Structures are given as structure tokens and as C-alpha cells.
Image (cartoon, rainbow, N blue to C red):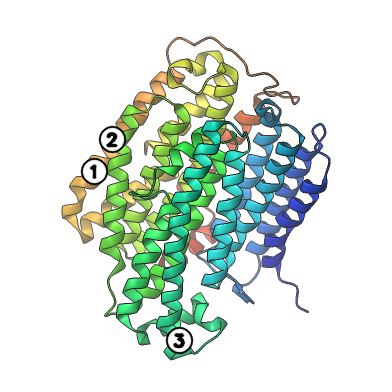
């Protein structure tokens, strides 16, 4: 039997989840085991990156998914490190600690499977597993507000996943007369090859359901309201994987569907619908940023803004805009997860996650404060980070393809950037607010460095991706942009 590295990447976290569920959650051992499994997953992702492209049963490796597999492994590893430093302050009892660590690795395995799956049905199952694991992590505190946020997450995303399932079934039905019954009817590669021979009406209807369904999980308007609640109430590390990973997996599923439907010249063009969803998300989130008083909710709204921008870029279409969208997804995941590490650390130091209670971090905690300041500047689209390059490329591609869209795009970018710069000043500059540390916060040796170092690492990677991306990665991203059409 042939060994497939893709399956190793998927199953290692699930084996780790079983071990963590069975392990007595005493002391720091579960957190360190969680970190060890995540580090090993990163090693396997690097090994997978060096393997030839191909299909391995229900999995596929190609230029489109491998950069996101590596990104997921990096964010998973740094999140596990941040979690090891902050989990004591969450105040979990033994049962909740066991559930939290096991659910984290269940989520990571499902995230990898969603990205690597060639079978659209398996991808749907993987995203549903990741969602259920996320719901458990959001609810793990058991407080009324956490349970309410988890239920809202579950109900809205349940609606979304049901719509996505119907869209997946429609894709299968559209291909069945051409491919026949069985697994090939759900294979992304097989569907893309025969899409031009399928019924264009069924393909168009399938894409509408898939975009709305998976768009719910990607945080797109109008079914976006679960995201701020989930990120405000769940354990601190969950923000990084929700905004940095789950949203990407959902939008990635939309991109796979777009490549199939877009291959039929008579099917509905996916672009205008994606542009509409993207602009609605960008504009609503951009104005909403001005009214947020809770820091974690504020950055959750920023995630809605940036997923809208990426969706907009893919809606414009063409290699240049697709490349901008891929870069934006990668850059947003790196920067946003780093910002959540920093704001999570600040919340434990100050004893509050309100913007008014977190101030002057650059003076009181320079390493953490300046990392947060640079991270917020990166989210605002300032150089030298990846989001500046991707947003500039979006503007250029839009000017070439649909110049009339520059007005709403520019308005959304400026409103959101101004709001984030204002928040940067409140959180990082000015007179420091008093510290009121949460009990057991940063009890590991090194203290707050466990949050500062991952944040700086993500910022460095985001800058390198913009200024000096490895030639192999750049070529892979260009090829992935061509795959999307």
C-alpha cells in the first residue's frame, strides 16, 4: 500500500486529539503535547510541500492548496504556543481543558482535510467537522454569553452548511450524465475537466447555493453575525484559528466551485455575485469598525472586511486579480492571527478586552505594543506588508477590468483603514492604562514573550511574502491563480 504524505498531515492531528482526550489534564503536559503535535504537523506540511503534485485517493495536492496547507500548519503551531502560555488563565477545570485541547487538534485535522480534499463531499464533511470543533471551543467556558455565542455560531453556520450541501449535490447531479454515478462525480479534478459539457443551469444554481452556504462560514454578509460573538466569547487562542484558518477553508471551497462553474461558457458568471458579496462585506465592516468598543469584536469585524476584499478580488477574476486574492488570504491570516495573539495578551495583562482599558502598550510593554501597532498598520493596508501589495494589486486589476467599481472599493478601503489607524492610536500610543493581570496569566517561563514572539514572527513572514517571497512559492501562487481562471 502506497504511503501518502497528505494523509499523514490529516491524521496526525486526529491521533493527537485522541491522545489529548485520553490524557489526564494535569499541569502543563496537555498544552505541551498540543504544541508538540502542532510542531510535528508543521514539519509534515513542509515535507508535503516538496512532494510532486497529484491525487491520492480522496486527496489532491496542487499549486492552489499547498500554500494554504503550509499557512495552516504555521498558524496552528504558533497558536498552540500562545495557548500554552495563556490556557492557565482561562480557568478550565479538567473536563474543559481536555475538551479544549482535543477539539483544537480535531479542528486542525479537519482544516487540513478541507484544503487537501479532491472530493467535494469530503471537503463538505471536513468543514463541518472543523465547525463543530470550533463551536465546542467557543462554548468551552460554559458561561451564558459563551453558550449563546456558540449556539449562534452553530445555528447560522448550520444554515450555511445545509445550503452548501445542497449546492454540492447539485454539482454532482450536473455531472452525473457526463461522468456517471460514483466518486468521480464529486472529484474536483473530474468536474473541472467535464464542466463545459454539464447543464449550465444546474451549475449556476449550484454555485449560488455554494457561495451563500460557504460564504456564511467565510464571514461574508449577510450571514456574518456569528463571527464577532464567537471571537469575543471563546478562549483567546480560538480567535487566531477562526479568523486565520476556518474562514480561509470556507472561501477555498467557494474557489474550487468557481473554477468548475467558470469553465462553462453558458453558465452564470461567478464574478458579479462574488463582487457583490465582497463589496457588501467590505462596506458594512468598514463602517462597523468605527462603533466597536470591544477589541476582540473589532478585529472580528476586520476579518469580515478582509474576507470581503478577497472575495471581491476573485470576483473581478483574471490571473492578476486572482493572485491578489490569494495573497490577501495568506497575508490576512498571518497578520490577523498575530494581532489576536497581541490583543489576547494585552487583555490578560489589563484584565479587560475593552479598547478603553487597553492603552499605551507601546510605552508600558514595548515588545508587545509595537508588534500590535505594526499588526494593526498591516491590517490597514500600509506597507511593507502583504496586504498593501494585495490591495494595490486589487485596485490596479479593478481599474483595468471594471473601473466603475473603484469608487465603492476605494471608499471601503479608506473607511476601514482610517478606523484601524484610530484604534492603533488608542491601543498602542498615549498614556498607559493600569495593569490588572488575569490570575495565572503567562505563567510559563518567558511570560508575555509567548505572545510577542509569535506576533513578530507572523509580521516578519507577512513582510517577506510581500518583499522577498521565495521563487518557488511565488511560482506556485501564480499557477494557483491560473487554475482559478
Circle 2 residues within 10 Å: few <14, some 14–19, many ≥20: some
Query: Which one is nearer the viewer's eye here, 410 or 438?
Result: 438
Mark 1 or 2, nearer chain start? 2
Left or right: where 470 falls relative to 251: right
Left or right: where 457 falls relative to 42: left
Q: Which residue is mark 2?
A: 287
Circle 1 residues within 10 Å: few <14, some 14–19, many ≥20: few
Circle 3 residues within 10 Å: few <14, some 14–19, many ≥20: some
Vertical placement of residue 173 versus 122, above or below: below
Residue 288 at least partly seen: yes
Q: Which residue is mark 3?
A: 176
Residue name at image x 46 percent, y 79 percent: 172
Q: Residue 160 in the image: state x and y as whole percent.
A: 43, 57
Are the residues tagged 3 and 2 within 8 Å (C-beta)? no
Which of label 1 and label 2 is nearer to you? 2
Vertical placement of residue 41 versus 190, above or below: above
Amino acid at each position: 500500500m502506497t504511503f501518502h504524505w497528505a494523509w499523514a498531515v490529516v491524521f496526525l492531528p486526529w491521533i493527537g486529539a485522541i491522545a489529548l482526550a485520553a490524557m489526564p489534564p494535569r499541569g502543563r503536559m496537555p498544552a505541551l503535547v498540543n504544541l508538540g503535535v502542532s510542531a510535528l504537523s508543521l514539519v509534515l506540511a513542509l515535507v508535503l510541500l516538496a512532494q510532486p503534485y497529484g491525487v491520492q485517493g480522496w486527496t489532491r495536492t496542487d499549486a492552489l492548496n499547498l500554500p494554504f496547507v503550509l499557512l495552516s500548519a504555521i498558524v496552528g503551531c504558533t497558536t498552540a504556543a500562545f495557548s500554552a502560555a495563556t490556557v492557565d488563565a482561562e480557568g478550565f477545570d479538567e473536563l474543559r481543558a481536555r475538551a479544549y485541547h482535543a477539539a483544537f487538534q480535531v479542528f486542525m485535522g479537519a482544516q487540513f482535510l478541507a484544503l487537501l480534499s479532491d472530493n467535494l463531499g469530503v471537503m463538505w464533511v471536513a468543514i463541518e467537522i472543523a465547525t463543530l470543533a470550533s463551536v465546542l471551543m467557543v462554548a468551552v467556558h460554559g458561561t451564558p454569553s459563551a453558550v449563546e455565542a456558540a449556539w449562534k455560531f452553530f445555528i447560522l453556520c448550520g444554515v450555511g452548511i445545509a445550503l452548501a450541501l445542497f449546492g454540492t449535490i447539485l454539482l454532482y447531479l450536473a455531472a452525473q450524465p457526463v461522468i456517471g454515478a460514483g466518486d468521480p462525480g464529486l472529484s474536483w479534478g473530474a468536474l473541472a475537466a467535464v464542466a463545459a459539457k454539464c447543464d449550465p443551469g444546474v451549475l449556476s444554481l449550484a454555485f449560488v447555493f455554494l457561495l451563500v452556504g460557504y460564504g456564511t462560514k467565510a464571514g461574508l454578509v449577510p450571514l456574518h453575525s456569528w463571527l464577532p460573538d464567537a471571537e469575543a466569547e471563546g478562549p483567546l487562542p480560538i480567535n487566531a484559528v477562526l479568523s486565520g484558518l476556518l474562514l480561509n477553508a470556507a472561501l477555498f471551497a467557494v474557489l474550487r466551485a468557481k473554477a468548475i462553474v467558470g469553465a462553462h461558457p453558458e453558465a452564470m458568471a461567478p464574478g458579479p455575485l462574488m463582487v457583490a458579496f465582497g463589496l457588501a462585506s467590505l462596506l458594512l465592516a468598514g463602517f462597523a469598525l468605527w462603533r466597536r468598543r470591544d477589541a476582540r469584536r473589532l478585529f472580528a469585524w476586520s476579518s469580515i472586511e478582509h474576507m470581503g476584499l478577497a472575495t471581491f478580488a476573485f470576483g473581478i477574476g483574471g490571473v492578476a486579480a486572482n493572485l491578489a486574492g490569494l495573497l490577501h488570504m495568506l497575508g490576512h491570516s498571518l497578520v490577523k492571527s498575530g494581532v489576536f495573539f497581541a490583543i489576547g495578551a494585552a487583555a490578560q495583562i489589563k484584565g479587560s478586552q475593552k479598547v478603553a482599558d487597553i492603552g499605551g502598550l507601546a510605552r508600558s510593554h514595548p515588545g508587545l505594543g509595537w508588534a500590535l501597532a505594526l499588526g494593526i498598520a498591516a491590517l490597514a493596508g500600509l506597507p511593507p506588508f502583504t496586504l498593501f501589495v494585495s490591495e494595490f494589486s486589487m485596485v490596479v486589476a479593478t481599474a483595468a477590468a471594471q473601473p466603475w467599481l473603484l469608487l465603492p472599493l476605494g471608499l471601503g478601503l479608506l473607511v476601514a483603514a482610517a478606523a484601524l489607524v484610530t484604534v492603533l492610536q488608542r491601543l498602542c500610543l498615549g498614556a498607559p492604562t493600569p495593569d490588572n493581570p488575569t490570575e495565572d496569566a503567562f505563567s510559563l517561563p518567558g511570560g508575555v514573550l509567548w505572545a510577542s514572539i509569535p506576533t513578530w514572527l507572523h509580521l516578519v513572514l507577512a513582510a517577506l511574502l510581500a518583499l522577498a517571497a521565495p521563487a518557488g512559492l511565488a511560482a506556485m501562487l501564480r499557477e494557483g491563480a491560473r487554475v482559478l481562471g
